[in-house]
Amino acid sequence: MDSIVLLKLGGSLITDKTRPQTARPEVIARIAREIRAALAARPQSLIIGHGSGSFGHTVAQQHGTRHGVRTPEQWRGFAEVSVIAARLNRLVADALHEAGLPVISFPPSASARCVGGRMVELALSPLRSALDHGLIPLLMGDVAFDEQRGGVIISTEEVFAYLAEHLPVRDVLLAGETEGVYRNFATGDHRVIPRITPALWEQIRHGVGNSHGMDVTGGMAGKVRDMLSLVQRHPTLRAYIFSGLVPGNVQQALLGLPIGTEICASDDALHVAGKPTLA
C-alpha cells in the first residue's frame, strides 16, 4: 500500500462553533474543490476526517458523553450525539461528492472499541479495500462504545493516531480556523509558531488556548499534545496545523508545501536542517 495522507477538516473550519448545528457550506465546497485540484496535480492515497464543531460538541457537552455513559438518559444522549455528528458527515460527504471526489463514509462508532477512554480497535480492512480501489475514506469525530465507561467521544485526532499506528501514514494535516499554533493565545500574542518540538512545548503549553466556541476534545492544546505524541512514536511522520479558511491553503498542504505550524519529534532534526524552533 502507498503512503497515506490524513487530512482533518476541523470543526472550527467547517461549522460556526458559536451557533448550534450551523455549517459553513461555502467553505466546505471550496475545500472540496481544492482537494480535487491537489489530487489531480499530485495523486496520492488520502483519508479525510472532520470534527463535529457546533454539531456534535454542543450536544456531547450537554450530556457529558466525553466522561462516560451509564444512565438511560446518558445513553439517549449518546445516540443523539451520533445522529447529529452523522448529519454533518453527510453534508461533508455530499460536498466532496459534488466536487467529483470518490468519497465513502466510515463512521468510527460502527467499529471502534475503547477501554478507559482509549481507542484500542477500529476495523481497518474496509478502509484498506477502499484505498486499494482508489476511494477516499471519510471519517469523523464520533461516539464509541467503551468497555469501562460505557460510551465516550473519540476525536478525529484520536482516530488518526490509531490509523498512523497501523497504516503507512506519511503526513497528518490539520486544517482549522487559525493560521497555526499561536505563540501565546492567553495574552493575545497571535504570532504563529512555525515549529513545535517536545522541548519547546514544555515552555509554551500554558499559553496555548482552547478552541473558539464549544469543544469537548481538548481544543488546540489537545491537538498539539496528540500530534506530539504521534510524531514521537513515528519520527518520520510530518504533522501540520494550519488555517483552511485561507483559500488555497488546503491545496498547498496536500501538494507537500510547508504551511502553518509543523509538529516535530526532535530538536536535533531541526538543528541539523539549520531551522530554528521559534521565529
Image (spheres, rainbow, N blue to C red):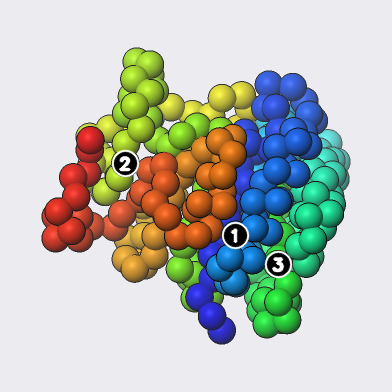
Q: Quadrant of residue 257?
A: bottom left
For marks 3 and 1, the one nearer the N-term is 1
Residue at 68 percent of width and 21 percent of height = 18
Q: Residues within 10 Å of mark 2 (few under 14, many from 20)?
A: many
Question: Against 111, is 69 above or below?
Answer: above
Residue 250: x and y in percent read: 56, 48
- Residue that label 1 marks: 38
**Residue for point 30% across, 45% down:** 195
Q: For marks 3 and 1, give the CA distance.
A: 14 Å
* Count of labels in the image: 3
Residue 91 vertical placement versus 36 (above, below): above
- N-term-proximal mark, 2 vs 1: 1
Amino acid at pointer 1: Ala
Q: Nearer the viewer, residue 246 or 58?
A: 246
**On screen, residue 276 above or below 115:** above
In the image shown, does 279 or 224 lie closer to the viewer? 279
Residue depth check, mark 3 versus mark 1: number of the one nearer the observer: 1
Q: Residue at x 53, y 29 (%)?
A: 211
Residue lying at 71% horizontally and 66% vertically, measured from the top left: 137
Q: Element under label 2?
A: loop
* x, y percent for residue 7: 58, 56
- The relative height of residue 39 versus residue 198 in the rendered view (above or below) is below
**In the rendered view, does 258 fall on the left or right side of 217?**
left
Q: How far is the residue under mark 2 from the one under mark 1? A: 23 Å
The residue tagged 2 is 194
The secondary structure type at the circle numbered 3 is strand
Q: Residue 136 shows which numbered tag? A: 3
Dot 3 or dot 2: first in sequence order is 3
Amino acid type of the residue tagged 2 in the rendering: Pro
Badge 3 vs badge 1, beta-carbon distance below 8 Å: no
